[in-house]
Amino acid sequence: IPFYTLPDAETIQRKPLSDTTHLEHPFRPHQYVFDINDYEAYIDQCHYILNRSCGRAALLRGGYLWRVAVSEVSFDKVLAGPSGLSLDPDETFAVTLSNGKKYVDDSLKESEILALTGVYSCAAG
């Protein structure tokens, strides 16, 4: 079950640009045989993602992403609130009320979700 803390956007500082992730899911050729090295690369990539601000968003997301994140991200980090406002709207979950008041929380980009769920591009025959 997804969970959001949603503090007032006016109370959140800007997120450092250096905290954003730029991911492309790995490509493998036709008939590639996956091995332990692929699994270790997946674990390393998860560790990299989860130890950035988007790790908090993965834990908040629930489901499989929560399961991947729970061993890396502390619940204290979740309860501390959003990591900051991002210039990238894909990194922020926002709710705007009819009076214009905006509440925000961290969100995962599609590329981060794909990486955490182990998606690969594989060539077809």
Image: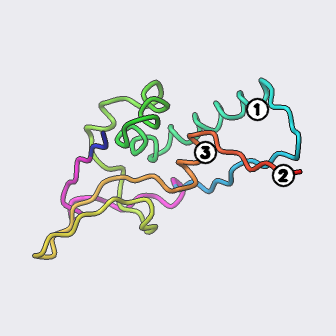
Q: Nearer the viewer, residue 105 or 64?
A: 64
Regarding mark 2 in the picture, which secondary structure is present there?
loop
The Cα–Cα distance between marks 1 and 2, rounded to whole angstroms, is 19 Å
Which residue is at a point 29% across and 63% down the rendered structure image?
Answer: 94
- Viewer-side label of 2, 3: 2
Q: Amino acid at mark 1?
A: Asp
Identify residue for label 2.
124
Which residue is at a point 88% across and 46% down the rendered structure image?
Answer: 30
Q: Which residues are magenta?
A: 4-19
- Please report whichever mark, 3 or 1, sits nearer to the chain's N-terminal start: 1
Identify residue for label 3.
115
Q: Amino acid at mark 2?
A: Ala
Q: Nearer the viewer, residue 119 or 14?
A: 119
Identify residue for label 1.
38
The Cα–Cα distance between marks 2 and 3, rounded to whole angstroms, is 20 Å
Q: Position of residue 33 (x, y in %)?
A: 85, 32
Q: Position of residue 63 (x, y in %)?
A: 40, 36
Furthest residue in direction left, as rendered: 99
The Cα–Cα distance between marks 3 and 1, rounded to whole angstroms, is 12 Å
Tell me the quarter of the picture where residue 12 sits: bottom left
Main secondary structure type of the part rendered in magenta:
loop
- Viewer-side label of 1, 2: 2
Q: Is residue 70 left or right of residue 100?
A: right
Regarding mark 3 in the picture, which secondary structure is present there?
helix
